[in-house]
Amino acid sequence: MCRGLLGRRCRLPFLIAIVVFEFFSACSSSYADVDPPPLINRGDGKDRDHQHYGYSSKFSSMLTTRLEKMASSPVASSEIFNVDDYGAMGDGEDDSQAFKEAWKEACSSTNAIFLVPNDRTYHLKPITFSGPCNSPFVFKIEGTIKASPHISDYEKDRRHWIVFENLAEFTVEGKGTINGNGRKWWLNSCKVNKTLPCKEAPTAVTFYQCTNLRVEGLRFRNAQKMHLSFQKCSNVKALNLWIYAPGNSPNTDGIHVTATQIILIQNCLIMTGDDCISIVSGSKNVRAKGITCGPGHGISIGSLGAGKSEAEVSNVVVDTAKFKGTSNGVRIKTWQGGKGYAENIIFQNIVMDNVTNPIIIDQNYCDQKEPCTQQAEAVQVSNVMYQNIRGTSGSEVAVKFDCSKSFPCQEILLQDIDLVHRDKADDKPTQAEASCKNARLKNRGRVSPQCPGRR
């Protein structure tokens, strides 16, 4: 029974169920706040992890077991902390203080539910929700959380808007929306206005050093920069998410994974102005399944090795995905001069629809104004499998391996690949091409296009 504004607490029975992985949901984008389009059918790809150099079946089994252990056991009741009971108004004014007060009490409670109710939009300045807290703990968003429109509010930290840190057995879920209110940031980006200096912009939501974490069912819209970042986390499930920003919004990655281990990203529709999913150094045992991407820059491992840094990414599986109108499909990108490795990677059961670079490894990546100088060191790319990938390329070169001369790409396997070039002028499919430089690869089954000398 609710106590009201001064009591601030309510109780109700609450059962926590094991997540059903195969439920499907999605994400969309535009400058205006419009609902995303309906979901896109992905086809009936079969899981063939076990065929990849012997490691993947064991990895998939281990990953499934670890993720199942993350499900909480049923509990008798939960304590509700409704932000409205702490003074949140949802009237266009800043509600940050009410959220902070509700968090403080919820964090120290047992079986707490932090509730953002529906039918209201709550404005927040940059805010950090810190643990450790008593667990299990649910942050339930049914309404809308919207970022402060004032860039001056970010003077202390231009890199973050909402941060969850040092939390365990933590869930963020609901049918609500997290809106980064990013238009003003995009217009002030040096990638949009070349006359402006390049400055940092906030990631909308960051999870930092969280374990046994679940993020499910939410909509992320119009982030200032990246929408959702997992940094130094472990045992993570990101399920049934809609992520959307305009295709010309700069640096608006959908899901960014950095230094995170054992993470499942499943059943998401991501439409952004940058990578739908980016996986960077320190990440291991990453699985993305049931992803629809576009517009955007595809799913990328990297960039890695910038500024001669050392990078390590391993055990990545991208299974059952559709790319529509993206600049890249499945991409590995590394800078010259870097060190480390990207290894044990599977891309399988994927459909490409008018994708400019469906399959690409770029070890000469250079995202800067000045030309990058030739360097001997490179991040080693090895043990990568592309299996059951079909569809249309927006360019003549559908497969491109631009690998390092001193550190060639090793153990690259292409199996059952069928990509054609579809010309925009007459919309007729024609034979696509492959470009393979310093790549040691094998073909199995029907592979088209093939690298010269590999037929």
Image (cartoon, grey):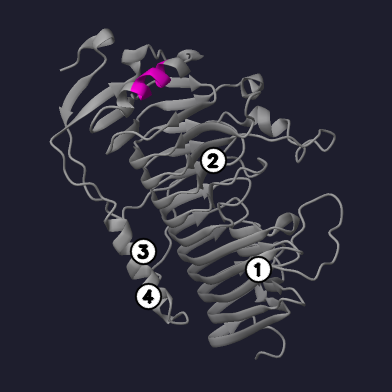
Q: Which amino acid, by three-letter code, is at mark 4?
A: Ser
Compute the Cα span from label 1 to label 2: 24 Å
Closer to the chain start, of discs 1 and 4, is: 4
**Helix, strand or loop status at disc 2:** loop
To which residue does mark 3 refer? 63
Of tags 3 and 2, which is closer to the observer? 3
- Name the residue: 29% across, 34% down: 134
Quadrant for the N terminus, please.
top left
User: Residue 96: horizontal and vertical position, in percent?
Assistant: 47, 18
Q: Which mark is residue 360?
A: 1
Q: Is residue 352 above or below residue 234?
A: below
Of tags 2 and 4, which is closer to the observer? 4
Of tags 3 and 1, which is closer to the observer? 3
**Nearer-the-camera pick, 310 or 455:** 310
Q: Which amino acid, by three-letter code, is at mark 3?
A: Leu
Of tags 1 and 4, which is closer to the observer? 4
Q: Which amino acid, by three-letter code, is at mark 1?
A: Ile
Instruction: Give the magenta range.
Output: 98-104
Number of marks in the rendered image: 4
Q: Is residue 271 above or below residue 341?
A: above
Is residue 103 located in the magenta-colored stretch of the structure?
yes
Contact, CB < 8 Å: mark 4 with mark 3?
no
- Name the residue: 35% across, 52% down: 24
Q: Which mark is residue 227?
A: 2
